[in-house]
Image (cartoon, helix red, strand yellow):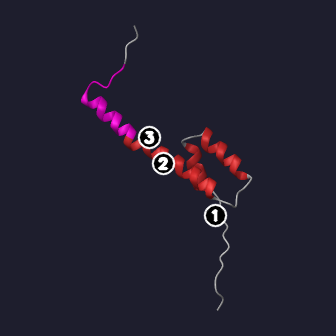
Amino acid sequence: MPEVYMLSTFWDVLWAMIIVLFIFIPLTMLWIFALMDLFSRRDIRWLKVTWLVLIIFLPIFGPLIYLLVRPEEQTTLVGREG
């Protein structure tokens, strides 16, 4: 019968909490933020597929690359003259 690994000691539980709180949750938030930013942009229509593939298939480095090298959003400012 295969052995089942359980968090049996205080230190195992502590390390599991550290991994979840300081590694897994921030990476998930970064991934979600990059996807939200990608889909909210209107100026990079055909590049969205490329960025989406990069973000999904490189889950750690994809969002970081996207957020570091993404082009500035082109907005047209409508304002008063004078």
Q: Is residue 40 left or right of residue 16?
A: right
Q: Residue at x 58, y 55 (%)?
A: 37
User: If you read the primary sequence from the N terminus, does the residue marked by circle 3 or circle 1 appear first?
Assistant: 3
State the separation of the CA atoms marked 3 and 1: 28 Å
Vertical placement of residue 81 versus 69, above or below: below
- Give the class, few, some or many, for how many residues have Cα within 10 Å of label 1's Cα (few <14, many ≥20): few
Check disc 3 and give the amino acid type: Phe
Q: Secondary structure under badge 1?
A: loop
Q: Which segment did they paint magenta?
A: 5-20
User: If you read the primary sequence from the N terminus, does the residue marked by circle 1 or circle 2 appear first?
Assistant: 2
What percent of the width, then of the height, locates residue 50? 70, 47
Q: Secondary structure under badge 2?
A: helix
Q: Which residue is under mark 2? A: 29
Q: Which residue is under mark 1? A: 72
Q: Secondary structure under badge 3?
A: helix
Q: Which mark is residue 24?
A: 3
Which residue ends up furthest to the bottom in the rendered image? 82
Q: Residue at x 48, y 48 (%)?
A: 29
Q: Is residue 38 left or right of residue 60?
A: right
**Quadrant assignment, res 54:** top right
